[in-house]
Image (cartoon, rainbow, N blue to C red):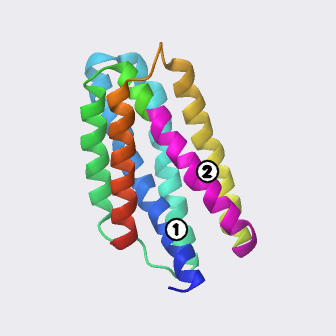
Amino acid sequence: MTSTDLLNQHLRVIYACEKGATGVYWGHRVVAAVFFRDLIAPLSEMHAHEMEHFARFGEILKARGARRVSFPLLWCAGGIAYGVLVALFGRQSVWTSTVTIEAIVERELMAAATVFKEADPQAYEHIHTILLDELAHKNGAELSLVGKPVAFVVGFAKVSASVAKRLAQVL
């Protein structure tokens, strides 16, 4: 695999995972509409950001002439299922999930920023801007957590993110 292929694969993984994040926040909002209406506004804002991020990474891939991930709806559907399931365990689970997933995204985007700073400064600027949104999501969720994070949600989020990343690398 060439260095360009590796860079494009990195972007494709982020692109797929951003689509998954749109589903996660959508799923959280479905449950919040019934059980925790006060969460609808922040979840809607995060959902809107993830939609923007997905579109922006799609534009970057297109500008680079790189293929996008196959079956983007797979990530969205997986995200919705994950988001609904996690939210059914309560608001603490929603915030635990957000903190955990956004920490994973932060690491991925920091790694991408390091690689793209020299290789593709325009992509780097987009990555850096998106990273700021993701950090705001994580920080807001940390402030909303009451007590300790829900342990099984942390594990579930990590496994789900790992599976999503691996699938995006091969599809």
Specify which label sits upstream in the sequence, 2 or 1. Answer: 1
Query: 23 and 102: which one is in front?
Result: 102
Q: Is 101 one of the magenta-colored residues?
A: yes
Q: Residue at x 55, y 60 (%)?
A: 56
Q: Residue 145: image x %, image y %?
A: 49, 19
Which residue shows up at 69% across the image and 62% down it?
114
- Circle 1 sits on which residue? 10
Residue 129, placed above or below residue 123? above
At x 58%, y 49%, the residue is: 107
Q: Is residue 63 above or below residue 115?
A: below
Do the CB atoms of the residues marked 2 and 1 lie less than 8 Å apart? no
Q: Position of residue 106 (x, y in %)?
A: 58, 46
User: Counting other residues with Cα less than 10 Å from the Cα at mark 1, is it few (<14), some (14-19), or many (20 or more)?
Assistant: some
Instruction: Please name the amino acid that badge 1 sits on.
Output: His
Q: Is residue 69 visible?
A: no
Residue at the far top in the pictured view:
147
Percent across and percent down for residue 53 are 53, 53
Q: Please name the amino acid that badge 2 sits on.
A: Ile
Which residues lie in the magenta part?
98-119
- Residue 150 drawn above or below residue 49: above
Examine the structure image and report whether residue 149 is included in the region drawn in magenta: no
Give the mark count.
2
Q: Nearer the viewer, residue 157 or 82?
A: 157
Residue 65 visible in rendering: yes
Examine the image and state in which quarter residue 23 appears.
top left
Q: Which residue is mark 2?
A: 130
Q: CA distance from mark 2 to mark 1?
A: 15 Å
In the image, 35 versus 169, the foreground residue is 169
Task: Determine the main secondary structure of the stretch shown in magenta.
Answer: helix
